Amino acid sequence: MSAKAISEQTGKELLYKHICTTAAVQNRFRYANVTAETDWERLVQDHPWLLTERLVVKPDQLIKRRGKLGLVGVNLDLKGVKDWLKTHLMKETMVGKAKGILKNFLIEPFVAHKQEEEFYVCVYATREGDYMLFHHEGGVDVGDVDSKALKLLVGVDEKISADTVKSQLLTHTPADKKEMLTSFLVGLFNLYEDLYFTYLEINPLVVTKDGVYVLDMAAKIDATADYLCKAKWGDMEFPPPFGREAYPEEAYIADLDAKSGASLKLTILNPRGRIWTMVAGGGASVVYSDTICDLGGVNELANYGEYSGAPSEQQTYDYAKTILSLMTREKHPDGKVLIIGGSIANFTNVAATFKGIVRAIKDYQNPLKEHEVTIFVRRGGPNYQEGLRVMGEIGKTTGIPIHVFGTETHMTAIVGMALGHRPIATEPCVAAHTANFLLNTSGGTITPASSRSASFSEVKTVAENSSAQKTCAGLPPETYCNDIPPSVVSLCPSVFISVAKSTTLFSNHTKAIVWGMQTRAVQGMLDFDYVCSRQEPSVAAMVYPFTGDHKQKFYWGHKEILLPVYKNMADAMKKHPEVDVLISFASLRSAYDSTIETMQHPQIRTIAIIAEGIPEALTRKIIRMAEEKGVTIIGPATVGGIKPGCFKIGNTGGMLDNILASKLYRPGSVAYVSRSGGMSNELNNIISRTTDGVYEGVAIGGDRYPGSVFMDHVLRYQDTPGVKMIVVLGEIGGNEEYKICKGIKESRITKPVVCWCIGTCATLFSSEVQFGHAGACANQASETAVAKNKALEEAGAFVPKSFDELGDVIKSVYDNLVAKGVIVPAKEVPPPTVPMDYSWARELGLIRKPASFMTSICDERGQELIYAGMPITEVFKSEIGLGGTLGLLWFQRRLPRYACQFIEMCLMVTADHGPAVSGAHNTIVCARAGKDLISSLTSGLLTIGDRFGGALDAAAKQFSKAFDSGMLPMEFVNKMKKDGKLIMGIGHRVKSINNPDMRVQILKDFVKQHFPATQLLDYALEVEKITTSKKPNLILNVDGFIGVAFVDLLRNCGGFTRDEADEFVEIGALNGIFVLGRSMGFIGHYLDQKRLKQGLYRHPWDDISYVLPEHMTM
């Protein structure tokens, strides 16, 4: 949600910190917070004024009308406050229908004042701007301020002025207080705007000769503006509504949601309830809650929540295990039910999310059986068949009763089954995978009615064919606009302001630009175009500011095509003048700027904004600019819309198998408009099963202020000859549905309208519940779903008794139109087939091919990086260090602690051996030549071989071969001399038996102390005795020591077979130790040369012996 209530203390803190006014705001920051854990001595030390002033104490828990409820202690000393709290703190209290415990209190200085010094002020947001209400009388008995108060509307992008405040709000205010109040109200409004408040009420606001006192305050802020206001807000806390506890599980899911691109929500209503839900989709989650309440389950409904936006398997697992943990803590005498529901997904891989749920069920299978939990599942969307299959399998293997249903079952039918109101249906046989679009569908259809013969067969009117001819969003003659009362116009300006917008948004010639690198969505659009028999793709180009101009490959049926991608939007517009639609996949942070930029190009007539979470103030600016320019906005927070046979926005309609199943490749006779994207796909399914199909469908988005509203599209449909009936899926919150009532009553809308507003359960809850969509919250009785459904029915719309009956009502109205001859069903023509993408076919398990690469050391695909089977978190918890990590990645083993330490010691002693050795020398020369780090390091590494540093492998091989063949050390030395070969790992330029290498000594001491056996090392030391007797510098050097010691480690640590140990030596693993260690030194030399700013190296002539052939010197 966006608008979230904050505590009075938080609101006042923001006001005191950031208000800019010449009025003297008194008692700034003079408040003290009290809970059951408060240390009174410390509180008095922090707030000494508590001992000297008269006080006011009140609960700070989002409770309205505290004064009338007797929940304010006034004019008390500190002892009086403590006595008052004894009767209130931690006491259960009823506030309306909500019962809760008073836990959090606020103490402030008491302000002695007269009644005539009390005022009322409130600022709140609406679609067209922000209203400031002011009344010259305030306090607990202020009464109905909506009818009493003076109002000032500050339009979007307009500024408030002191003169306007004086002339429109302060007409009844005493003259001596006008200047002070004017300055305060202007400052308050600017604060409200700057800090993205959506509601701010002060009652009473006391004004005396000393200044302004903010006594009681209630406020909401737009939580989506956190990225804009974090510096001023700080760490904002949002308390739960009174009567509902704040559970740690809710905070955990909120944290998951904040870290995810998906949407994860959880509200615990009744932790002892027997009915639990795990629903995919913001709209669907409301529908399921409605149905549960309709069937009498309101008192047993345990939670409200949703998961949507394509969460990963791990995220779904974390969400599911939280639900299962909560529902298996306390038994219920009747057992419990878990409803895993959802509409037909547009783009979420159902199988992937269900695998996460299945993992959670496996983990909790015993508690679930112990608590007698029965699970009911209904889902559709990409790969849903596989998801349902794995869900059914887990029921069979665990013994948990799990009933599984797909798109053939009405979305909420499982609720009636779960609550015992209808028999549990026989689980249908479904296809094994989402691959039906590989087949020509002409052989049969599940749609009961015939459908139109082609995707563009209907007669087109002049208005539909001409994009140049504009109408006022389908408005009738101007007399209708003139008859509308101003109060109604203000509620829906986008409909009633006379702006040139096209009645027809999309045709089978529509061209679009897609903002964002959304290749899957674009390919889905092209597949839709192809199956609709369009002549050309609907996507002309893409805009992606983070890369240069290039071409992106896509499929057009069986053929590969290239679409241009532009870095700059202006270039895309200039090169594609035929484009009039932009589909924006920009993030919530960049959606505003990119949309404003788009509207600078007059060719764009429709913009779809997919992003969810755009601050409401920015959305309203987009709406205002769109109205001025005659641009239709779909969204924000939407999946888009679809016009069968013509055009679809992004992921709307789901995958191609759903496009075919719902007959979306050709137009029907029914147009719909919905808030929810997921529910729009469910409407596609319902309408295709009960009528001849969808003509057009739009999901306007779940935000409080969608870019276009229900009436915009209903009027378009009314004025479109091909549309014969209209379906509207409304929602709790807002007043837009009342415009439809007015249109029906005044005969502006004459086509049959089937309408249902979801969210009817809200009136049954004891405390306020914010549903999945930001706009799904009723701020007054008229905004409830129950009130709107009643008004629609009274106006003449066809309103079902519940969502369960929506399909039946649609079918009844459709059949009546067919009987009257208004609709003449046409013959179905099969669409062309489209091949499945390789990547999706592979995911479905339909194909296989040999992998190009194989790896057995690391897996980065899941939620957590894995080294040789060990999660990265475990790597750190176990403190295996760098040596242990190397053991995992090089040897696929968790090595003993001493082995890890030995590896790290080897890296330390091989890290560097001065600048004179060849590798360091090359690195230095490269660095001084201005080369980069990688080039310089590579130059040094390329010198490593048998002569420099490569002796580890060679020494290990030579000594191992001699030892394993049974040669005596003397025999080995003599044989190497006879063969004319050097013994690798023997000899040092500087060190000798009399001047030992301390690196070797350190390693030798460690190995002798910790290794279980050192047979090869002992053999090598015997060889050293022979060689040093001939020449004192023929010692076992550090390379040789590490080589033979490593062989002892591999053979004797218990982690390897003899063959495995020998294989690691053979393939060069030991040289890797030198390469890795010496890389640290080479990098050090590179950085040293750069730090010393050494110039280009040139070798001195006097250090070069020029020996030329004699004939060349003559």
Image: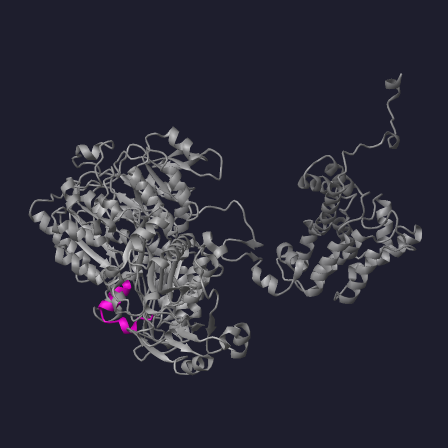
Identity of the residue drawn at 46% across and 35% down: 567
Tell me if 671 is positioned left or right of 266 in this view: left
- Residue span colored magenta: 288-302
Main SS type for the magenta part? helix
Q: Is residue 994 in sight in this rendering?
A: yes
Tell me if 59 is positioned left or right of 507 in this view: right
Q: Is residue 290 magenta?
A: yes
Q: How many marks?
A: 0
- Of the 4 image quadrants, the one containing the C terminus is top right
Residue 101 drawn at (x, y percent): 38, 77
Q: Please identify the residue farthest to the left as the structure is shown.
A: 820
Please say which color scheme the image uses: one colour
- Of the 4 image quadrants, the one containing the N terminus is bottom left
Q: Give above or below for 1099 relative to 431.
A: above
Say which quarter of the image contains residue 12: bottom left
Given residues 30 and 1022, the one toward you in this image is 30
Residue 1006 drawn at (x, y percent): 78, 63
Q: Give above or below for 660 relative to 48.
A: above
Given residues 384 and 670, the one toward you in this image is 670
Q: Give above or below for 661 relative to 275.
A: above
Q: Is residue 175 magenta?
A: no
Residue 562 drawn at (x, y percent): 41, 33
Identity of the residue drawn at 45% across and 64% down: 26
Residue 960 drawn at (x, y percent): 76, 55
Q: Is residue 347 in sight in this rendering?
A: no
Q: Please identify the residue farthest to the front as the structure is shown.
A: 176
